[in-house]
Amino acid sequence: MLTKVFRFAIGCAIGFLVWRYGTPIYAAAVAPLARVFLSASRLFAGTRLTPAGMNIEISGPSIPPVRIPFSELTYNVILFFGLFATVRGLFRDRSVIRFALAAVVLALTHVFATVADAVFVYATRLGTWSNAHFSPFEQDFWTAADYVYRIGGMFAIAFACWVVAAGPAALRSASAGRPSRARG
Amino acid sequence: MLLALFEIPLLLDPVDRTVIRPFTAGIAAVSGATLHLFGEVVRVEGTVISGSCFAVDIKNGCNGVEATLFVIAAVLAFPATWRSRVAAVVIGGLILQIANLIRVVTLYLIGCHRRTWFESFHLAVWQSIIFAVAIGFFLIWSRRAKLVHAD
């Protein structure tokens, strides 16, 4: 059990470093993908997403410029790395592939989170401009989406990626410690 | 999906006014009392803990409720007896509130003594730790709950 906790802590430390120092590079990779989805809406046609350190700046012909805190949408990588660090034989072929697939799924959720956060900012934070372009229902919807993702959803996603990728065996082994009384 | 279903009511003003804010004010009061034990002179007003060097306002996302909801959703989705589930929610909630108390106290102290560290600890470190505690608790409980269920 202590070994698992230790491995988890090391994984979290690596995840923290990846998040802290890798976010500017990661933002440059996520921004073009998020732009594709954002531009699908007529309101956001021709939108530009420019990485700016830990943030992404958004501007376009028909929208005012805003800045979204990209690093606040991606710090579930810390938990993601921590959980995968508990998997034995992570660097074996099949495990590495599963880890890579889980990382791709996590990255896709970051793309959608970036889109959702951008729309949330435009829908709710720009006063009369927001009210002119978004209905009250749309404003409530994007507020709820952003809230659910930030307050717990992002961690649930990291957890789900790990459970699905690592499989039930890893789940059992992660919680394995002394045999419980119920079994004895 | 369950987690989203549980979290959305927190956005409703009546829920926030009558449940979340009083609960968070309670956390602030306990955190303030704990800081007093460490010799810190702080004043608690509602959800705000303020001292001569720093002030923190405990908001949704920093009161442990979100992690407790995660445990409730996970426990409900797991095939266990209701007795076992209720015990998990009560014990898990208590453990998370203790962890959250440590979070609030340490964040205040970090804000006082290492201001540049505050944002990283507030956002990334402590939020990850709180959910790690929630996940760890669920994993340990689910192993035992399975055995109870099999019996």
Image: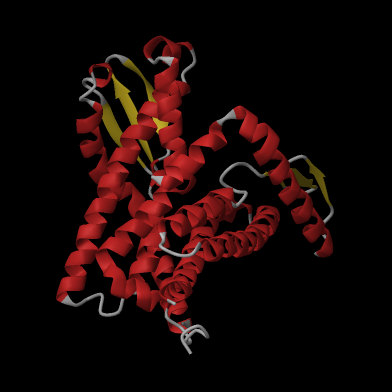
Rendered location of residue A145, percent (x, y): 41, 35
Q: Which residue is the extreme one toward the left?
A: A93
Tell me if residue B80 can be seen.
yes
Q: Residue at x 25, y 79 (%)?
A: A89
Q: Residue at x 76, y 39 (%)?
A: B46
Occupied quadrant, residue A52 = top left
In the rendered view, would you say A146 is above or below A101? above
Tell me if residue A75 can be seen.
no
Left or right of B92 on screen, residue B6: left
Q: Which residue is the extreme one toward the bottom?
A: A184
Rendered location of residue A171, percent (x, y): 35, 71
Q: Residue at x 47, y 37 (%)?
A: A147
- Which residue is more in the foreground, B27 or A78? B27
In the rendered view, would you say B113 is above or below A112? below
Left or right of B92 on screen, residue B48: right
Q: Which residue is the extreme one toward the front?
A: B151
Q: Residue at x 83, y 64 (%)?
A: B37
Occupied quadrant, residue A12 = bottom left
Left or right of A128 on screen, residue A117: left
Rendered location of residue A143, percent (x, y): 45, 30
Occupied quadrant, residue A169 = bottom left
- Which residue is more in the foreground, B63 or B112? B63
Left or right of A37 on screen, residue A21: right
Numbered label tally = 0
In the rendered view, would you say A92 is above or below B126? below
Figure coloring: secondary structure
